[in-house]
Amino acid sequence: MSNEKDFVKEVTNIDEDFAQWYTDIVRKAELADYTDTKGCIAIRPYGYAIWENIQNYMDKKFKEAGVKNAYFPVLIPEGLLQKEKDHIEGFAPEVAWVTEVGEEKLDERLCIRPTSETIITTMYSKWLSSWRDLPFVYNQWCNVLRWEKETRPFLRSREFLWQEGHTIHETADEAKERTLQMLNIYQDLLEDFLAIPTIKGEKTEKEKFAGAENTYTIETMMYDGKALQSATSHYFGQNFTKPFEVKFQNRDGKEEYAYQTSWGSTTRLIGAIIMAHGDNRGLKLPPKVAPIQVLVVPIAMHKEGVEEKATEICNRLKNKFRVDGDFRTNVTPGVKFNDSELKGIPVRLEIGPRDIENGECILVRRDTAEKITVKLDELEEKIETLLEDIQKNMYNVCKERLEAKTTIAHTLEEFEANINKEQGFIKAMWCGDEACENKIKELTTAKSRCMPFEQEHLDDKCVVCGKPADKMVVWGRQY
Amino acid sequence: MSNEKDFVKEVTNIDEDFAQWYTDIVRKAELADYTDTKGCIAIRPYGYAIWENIQNYMDKKFKEAGVKNAYFPVLIPEGLLQKEKDHIEGFAPEVAWVTEVGEEKLDERLCIRPTSETIITTMYSKWLSSWRDLPFVYNQWCNVLRWEKETRPFLRSREFLWQEGHTIHETADEAKERTLQMLNIYQDLLEDFLAIPTIKGEKTEKEKFAGAENTYTIETMMYDGKALQSATSHYFGQNFTKPFEVKFQNRDGKEEYAYQTSWGSTTRLIGAIIMAHGDNRGLKLPPKVAPIQVLVVPIAMHKEGVEEKATEICNRLKNKFRVDGDFRTNVTPGVKFNDSELKGIPVRLEIGPRDIENGECILVRRDTAEKITVKLDELEEKIETLLEDIQKNMYNVCKERLEAKTTIAHTLEEFEANINKEQGFIKAMWCGDEACENKIKELTTAKSRCMPFEQEHLDDKCVVCGKPADKMVVWGRQY
């Protein structure tokens, strides 16, 4: 556990050691820190403010889509967890167990939720009686725990924050539609809000969620060409509703098991933002999710009228943007510039005595480092346009990288060569056999990301075995 | 565990069995339900929507007061919990321990946070170095677990949701000021938002938080005259910052331990709303916190134009209020009226063919059952005034009860007689001796609620021992 006080200002070069660069950004931009609880992080205010903005965006979209929030217990009795066989097999190895309370041993162990299908489905079985009650479209914002062996802040933390939606429906079609509806909200979040292009598709049998019929995913590419699974949505059919007896009287007066979905996204999205957009100067936040969109930095603050003018501009801009001012007296403007870049603030506004005389100020873009002189009476409209521009530009930069680092492979040799050169995504045909998937993983450590909804016909045969293949799969190494 | 399907519609009489009435309301108004995790509840969407409104109110006030949200681990290593002696003594008996993960035993037990002073103070020690860094004014919205022997939904649930604020400061004065500042926000929440009058004061030595120097509290009175501690704010001095070594270089260049506070409020507030305002017809929600402020109920919905008009009014009012419509076709308007009252919706809007003809509708107040005929073109302004009226009236009803059920006692006999008659609050002088406090508890089961900030001089001597006394204490039985 290293100490904040020991930080050196410098950030590791992004192209030399991406992993160390990532850790540097997380800690030096004060997004999160390690704790005495091994594998668990403390999310610091600046990091949490990013999560709050993500939550606000999603919660609004969810509510527009008819989702209601609720809350279910963090502890799940062992007996409940074991009711669905695939589910317990998938989660058992990484579950934390409460066995004692005060001085007493418990009769039955309680696990800390790794996900809440079992406890929520149990409650649904109590609450459901007729088709008229359906659908239940509930979501909870909460913490979950999965005891990962290797952890990384945000990306793979033993405890993380997330939302988990759980729905039950009268028909399979309605449930399937809901699965895709929520996946589209995730895609909008990634593309429109976080400025990260996505590939949307279905997971293979091997990669799907423990207990699901189908798992749909939003895949994104990070700076180093590796993939990050950014959100998933599952169709369960009746896999849980049968063992948990979630029954209703249908329109024909007959008993039927409900059709179920779940969908989730987590604080790992903060990791996605860092790794998709950051550079050697630090974090780079898309304006829509940035806790501070504009940082006002007074130049020569000791000169008469500068602090007052900078304060006035701060207050004026706060009506329209998320604004902060850096009025520290014990550091130079140069330090403030560096800090604003390290923290990824989209626009820096510099104002000194000369600018005030001329009725103008300087805006500096975080994404391109471009400096723009702007008349003070045009500030609001200029900043608004600038923020839109930055948001678009950041998306385009990622989009270009995604395209540049996505290649096609017709043979295993091509596959290996491409992934070792670019470490990006490989598009290749697949016969549907898990053995071929395993072979690719053994050879290249790449996994199937998904079978994209937007299929392309690259070839007639499987990239591994050469047998007939009609599925195009996107492959990549992953976080 | 009883089943939703077995519900009878009737609610137990509030004056016959208040405890059973409470449980009926919690379950029949679909606020919460029991779960397979003993002592833990599921908060259903209608109950959770109340919590969300409370959260939104508080979070806004917090941010205006300079509070930043953050997040710390749910699991706390045993070693950390034991660093502050009073604290571990207070919480150890009700702490749940994680001892196993997957198939492995842990070397050190981890407790699920009953509160987060220890883990947060540890992080503060890493992050603090100079007086320039201070204050830290952080808050987290999260779940906590305390293994209560007897549980009741919302009031005393093993797991509950809350916010816990934790701050450190350069001076004792600044910390004390923060403690009271946050207490005032709680008071505003209770009085202005939840329409519940409060008594604000300091806890006695015996009743204060484990590890605190001073505990301040917001006390409220429920329908049956019992007290509910509704929020607390603690001043710790350096009790935690010394053992946890939260040091900083002060303005004189010397090392100093920071001064600390914490303050919290929980989902128990939902219990307060139920028990302060409810009646024999069900829940009664103050308009400001009500998830649905106006319920539109069409009368004779099969008649031409009724459903359309009701829908139109719903959509129109949604621009200004939280509105829902009850368009069920399988129940009578009478059932809808009952349900709207059970769910405590402040205003019901009834509209049928005759009303439409006359260009009017009927508004029914939940608090007084009064019916008011209103012209459709005046709806918005009438509803706005009505909601304000209801909010005020609900506060006044509680205020009158609080005053009627608060009595003064000069002797122990008077004390006993009063509390057994009214079961309200007793004001009495106290010498400051814990033995006298214990005596009152033994005799009457009442505890000291607080030493109110607004002191009155009732007498010169302690109500128990007759020795000189200058503190007026409010006493009461409690939830």
Image (spheres, coloured by chain):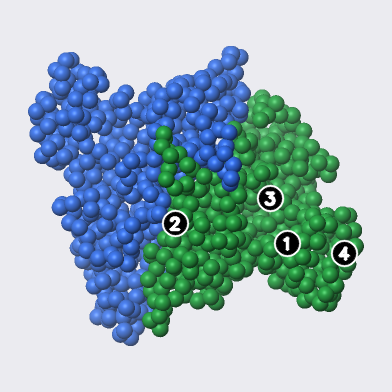
Chain colours: A blue, B green
- Where is residue A125? Give x, y as percent: 58, 26
Please state, as top left, top right, bottom left or bottom right, where the N terminus of chain A lies in the image: bottom left
Question: How many numbered tags mark residues here?
Answer: 4
| Pair 4/3: label in front | 4
The amino acid sitting under disc 4 is Leu
- Where is residue A323? Give x, y as percent: 38, 65
Q: CA distance from mark 1 to mark 4?
A: 17 Å
Residue topped by disc 4:
B412
Label ID, residue B46: none
Q: Residue at x 39, y 29 (%)?
A: A90
Residue topped by disc 1:
B449
Q: In front: B300, or B178?
A: B178
Residue topped by disc 3:
B273
Of marks 1 and 3, which one's residue comes earlier in the chain? Answer: 3
Q: In front: B234, or B433?
A: B433
Instruction: Respond whether the residues carrying marks 3 and 2 are from the same subunit.
Output: yes
Q: Decide if residue A99 is on the left or right side of residue A281.
A: right
* Disc 2 chain ID: B
